[in-house]
Image (tube, grey):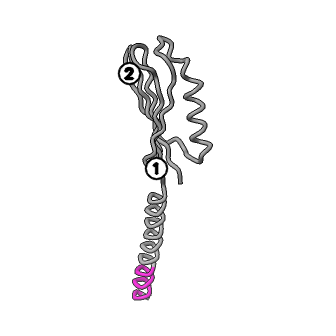
Amino acid sequence: MENFKKIMAVVGLITITLILLAFVNKTEEKAENEAILTMRTVEVTVGMNSFISIVDENGKLEKIELGKPSKDISVNMVQINKALNNIIDRGYKLVSTAGGGDNYVVVTTYTFVKK
């Protein structure tokens, strides 16, 4: 009876190990198949024009001009929203945003993943 318990414990540990290894391999496979797209908005109140830059998983850069500097940067929101929806329509999912700025420029970076 004692040997049977030991054998069952070893079989259980081997089974758990194989299951965990299967999940690890699936996780690595998903990470390898993901594509990253980055969109950055630069909104300025003085000086140069505001713009959107988009870089896809192949390194292709697309630049969208937003317009002349304005104290009211909300005028760019319609075009930014269109660009975000366009990216989502292409099968990407927003996973991260970061932004910052001052009185003269606001920079926001959006990171998308496509599986």
Can you say whether 4 is above or below 23 in the image? below
Residue under pointer 1: 57
What is the three-letter code of the residue carrying label 2? Gly
- Picture quadrant where residue 61 is located: top left
Does 4 appear in magenta? yes
In this rendering, is residue 63 above or below 43?
A: below
In the rendered structure, which amino acid carries the disc numbered 1? Glu
Q: Residue at x 53, y 50 (%)?
A: 114
- The quadrant holding residue 104 is top left
Q: Whole-percent x and y of residue 72? A: 51, 13
Closer to us: 98 or 49: 49
Percent from the top left, x then y, of residue 84?
56, 35
Residue 48 in the image: state x and y as whole percent: 40, 19
* Residues marked 1 and 2 touching at CB (< 8 Å): no
Question: Does 79 appear above or below 94?
Answer: above
Q: Position of residue 32 (x, y in %)?
A: 44, 60
| Distance (Cα) linking label 1 and label 2 | 27 Å
Q: Which residue is mark 2?
A: 101
Dot 1 falls on a residue whose secondary structure is loop
